[in-house]
Image: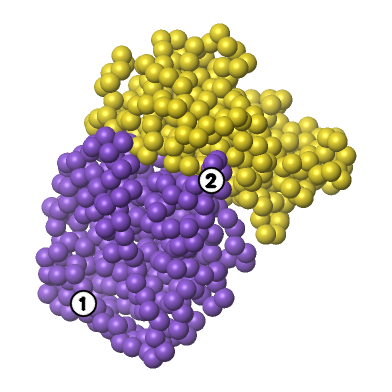
Chain colours: A purple, B yellow
Amino acid sequence: MDRRSFLKASGAGLATTLMGTGMLSWTPRSEAATISKTYYINDGTRAMPDGVSVYFKSYGDSATALSLPATPIICQEGDTLSITVINRLLKTHNFVIGGLKAGDPPLASTGNIASGATGTINLAIPSGAAGSYMFYDNVTGYNRFLGLHGGLAIMPSGSSTTLYSGSPTFKKQLFWIFNDIDPALNNAVQLNGTIPTTFTPRYFTINGLSSRPPGASGFGDPTIDAMADPRSKLSGSIGDRTLLRILNTGMCSHSVHTHANHMEWLTNNGVVRSSVWKKDSLYLRNNLGKIDSIYPFSPPPDAYPAVTTGHFPMHLHDEMSQTAGGGLYQFGSMTEIEFI
Amino acid sequence: MSGMGQACYVYPGAPATPALVTADISFSRGIYMNGSMLMDDGKSVTIWGFTDLAAAPGTMAGGNNGMGGSFPSPAIRVTEGQIVHTSLTVGNMWMHTIHHHGIEPSTENDGVGHFSYDIYNGTYTYQWKASSAGTYFYHCHVNTPLHAEMGMYGGLIIDPKPLSTDPVGTKRAFSNGPIYDVEAIWACDEIDPALHTLAWNAGTCGGDVGLNNFHPKYFIITGVDGASSALTNPGVAVNMKLGQTALVRYICAGFFPQKITFGGLTASVVASDGRPLPAAWSTTSIEASSAERYDCIIKPTTTGTYTVTVQFLHWITGAVLGTAKTRINVT
């Protein structure tokens, strides 16, 4: 597909038919509820952009489906989380919901889950817990970025538009979960070999996928192309303020850069900032770093003549992350921002 | 695709700008691919960048003669509210774009090839309006892990409109923002010389050319080696009188995180990424990630020589890979 065709397609059927299917959907309730979810710890391989097959583990939606990252959970303060985790692998694993702020104790944990066993979490979400969380396996230091990770969103009780009490408001929300992959590590785990002492990432993902540019195999396929993945793609009209729950499960720090609009920076590592800065580039710390920001979907302020539609990237500005296998620029951690 | 080898996933073009109007201010950029930077250890590193075709109309813009030029590339400086044209002319040997980082124009004028065009064998005029005073920079967005690393960037400053109540010549960081006397633009960058031998299209068709594996050896401030030269270079070091106010426009122009420390001075950070902060932030150091900008008001209260350090931090380990230094001399 050439560029002109791409612009035409992305402006019409392709994008709009997918819009909204990956967003975190939420309707507040006046009554607390029990939110139940079952994850299957499983494994499998996935083809990287250069064709290399890489081994992953995941908290799958089924016994065999590799889910990178895990399907997110959204709930509200006062709900009860009922999570069942079935370990289908030979090694011991666990499921930990990290604390809201760096240094906080975990919100909950299954404890170790032996091969073939089942772990559970039953947690009454306390008041004041609203925010963005990462859940992961920490039996080893590397299971998390082998793929055993996901996002948990806790909404303030009764609210569908705020991150925390009194926060700026939004209309939509999604997770951006970044990961960095060194296949040498993944292969060592798969083959039960010696774990490497160094980590050199060769692949970079957002919500488990890398981007594909026009003309590339998989371009536009929401199951392959992070640009088209509705879990990642920002799609909206003017005023569709979207909360970005940004999690870094990987080993590399990153700079999250949006085109067309500055983001409103609400939290850093779970801490509500004392004032909201407008930023086009945000420093996302490695190893469990977290940011919440709002993409406002305002008209691009420097366009002349003014526009209300267009297509732009979100990419990491540490540009090594925009590659695959040491080359292939535009096959890394990038997604599309679409003004419709 | 070109005389210098095949490139993949590039989108060549140089069309007419949609809805082109008469600009309030215009810049004309070519490119050079054979510049160099002499480091303090006596070694030279190949540098690419943008030329100012208006200042040196005899230079070529691509083709076979990408003549050397300044590093960083010539700054773009405009006034808030102006309609700006940045024309980029590229020959038929390479492809490049200009992305005005932090400027948020229409898709066609954003300089991202796969959403618009990689400029090739012609001229494209980026049209945009300077809506918010502050510190930005511009860079090439083609094979960016290489082209930005090679030096294809320059400063971009939007000054506020002068206030009618201000004396002529008054300089402010942004509209109704703090007044300053002395200005520094510190674009802090790290250089991995192993990457500076690659062709413009390296890795675009696949193959491991090492663009994921960054090992910088040189640490520079605004095109000057921070090992020692930047301590005294007149384009980098700040010389000011006691009682004066300096505005340091700090640009994290590299890929790895950085930590800048102002030699014991306290900075009042008044803006970031081209937007005023709701309240100034007083600090003696800033940790920044790639492409962040911080506008820092510094008003020393005693004379002296203050050594500013910029530490470059590994993106995984956080280890300090190198330090660039300059000075603020207060007399």
Q: Residue at x 35, y 34 (%)?
A: B211
Tally of numbered tags: 2
Question: x, y (%) of residue A153?
Answer: 39, 72
Label 2 marks a residue whose chain is: A
Horizontally, residue A33 falls left or right of residue A60, namely right
Residue that badge 1 annotates: A38
Horizontally, residue B38 falls left or right of residue A130, namely right
Q: Residue at x 61, y 27 (%)?
A: B26
Residue that badge 2 annotates: A306
Identify which residue, A278 or B235, lies in the foreground.
Answer: A278
Vertical order, B30 against A212 (above or below): above
Q: Residue at x 17, y 75 (%)?
A: A86
Q: Residue at x 58, y 55 (%)?
A: A278
Horizontally, residue A125 falls left or right of residue B226, namely left
What secondary structure is found at the residue carrying circle 2?
loop
Question: Is tag 2's residue or tag 1's residue first in the polypeptide sequence?
Answer: 1
Identify which residue, B111 or A13, lies in the foreground.
Answer: A13
Vertical order, B193 against B106 (above or below): above
Q: Is residue B270 visible?
A: yes
The amino acid at mark 1 is Thr
Viewport quadrant of the C terminus of chain B: top right
The amino acid at mark 2 is Ala
Label 1 marks a residue whose chain is: A
